[in-house]
Amino acid sequence: MKFNTTMPLALQPFFKKELADASTCFSKNNLQQSWLHLERAHILGQPYPFAHSYVHWKMLLFGIKTKNTKEIIGQIPRLLVGGIKSFVGNIPVGNTGGANVPPLRPMKIPKELSEIIKLTNQSS
């Protein structure tokens, strides 16, 4: 079993950019695009407990700000368990993290994110 702790330094700028882009889009009321960036941040951060939990926190806040009850209720267990699953390396790879998808379903990683992950894993 592999224990993950922190995100590789090479991956951090990509993760932070997705979060920043989510915030920018939200502030411009482009909610769909904001959510897409949160999903992308989730895919990048999912293997790392703190990053994974942080994205679920941001998704919970998104649900609260948009008054999306389904998202709020869906994010609470993900926030509580996601980081633990990351720590022990037991995650559904590629899962986008929202309440609109089953929490344990692996999903195909978008090609550009897959390339980023591959490149940053090689450099760490």
Image: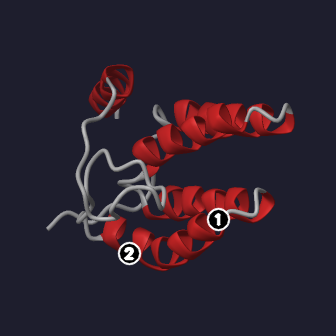
Tell me the CA gap for discs 1 and 2. 17 Å
Q: Quadrant of residue 60?
A: bottom right
Q: Amino acid at mark 1?
A: Leu
Residue 89 at x, y percent in the picture = 25, 63
Q: Position of residue 23 (x, y in %)?
A: 76, 40
Q: What residue does disc 2 label? A: 84
Question: Which residue is painted at 48% across and 56% down in the image?
Answer: 98
Q: Position of residue 107 (x, y in %)?
A: 26, 44
Image quadrant of residue 83? bottom left
- The amino acid type, in three-letter code, at marker 2 is Ile
Q: Nearer the viewer, residue 53 or 78?
A: 78
**Residue 78 falls left or right of residue 84:** right
Say whether marks 1 and 2 touch (CB < 8 Å). no
**Closest to the observer, 76 or 50:** 76
Q: What is the number of the mark on residue 60? A: 1
Residue 26, quarter of the rendered image: top right
